Amino acid sequence: MYSVQLLNKYTFDYELSKENRKFFILMNLKKKRVMVDLSATLIHHGHIRILKKASKYGNVFVALTSDNEVKKNKGYVPELNFNQRKEILSAIKYVFKVLKSKWTITTDYLRKNKIDIFVRGSDYRNQKIFQNTIFHQRTKGISSSLIRKKILSRRKN
């Protein structure tokens, strides 16, 4: 009898024949812990794309910026509060878990959360704070700031 722990949540027992040992070994491989940091004040397809790319490396943990940190660093209160953003992100199939974070992700924060790989947009290429950082190209023509500007310009007209 073998026990397998899936996604660090559920344990199942298996009796394995020789033919099924390969399956057992694959199931028992530890997935990497992958972090993506987001403010996600207005969630859009660019967020989904980076989460999808990150999920190819392992279980995705989203470091979600707190409301206070967004206000302090961007100068506004997010349209969706932290709990609303967390609920939406948690419902996305590529996300394993959402964690509250400060504006700046530190090596200590990554170590504390036992992160193996840090995935970021290419606009952060000059801020490599972690040895295993992977940069992906940003989705062109989309950002929460652009959406916000479009909405505000339509209100004026």
Image (tube, helix red, strand yellow):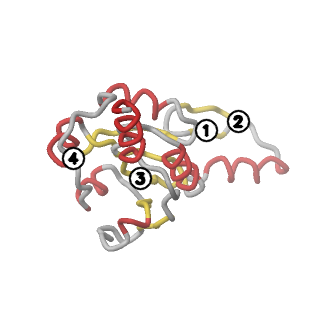
Q: Residue furthest right?
A: 19
Q: Residue at x 41, y 67 (%)?
A: 133
Mark 1 and mark 2: Cα distance apart in space: 6 Å
Residue type at numbered disc 1: Ser
Residue 36 drawn at (x, y percent): 41, 52
Residue 124 drawn at (x, y percent): 35, 66
Residue 137 drawn at (x, y percent): 51, 65
* Residue at image mark 2: 14
Judging depth in this view, the residue of 13 and 86 nearest the camera is 86
Q: Residues within 10 Å of mark 3 (few under 14, many from 20)?
A: many
Q: Residue 35 — which label?
A: 3
Q: Is residue 89 left or right of residue 104?
A: right
| Quadrant hosting residue 70 | top left
Mark 3 and mark 4: Cα distance apart in space: 22 Å
Q: Is residue 121 above or below residue 41?
A: below
Q: Residues within 10 Å of mark 1 (few under 14, many from 20)?
A: few
* Residue at image mark 1: 3
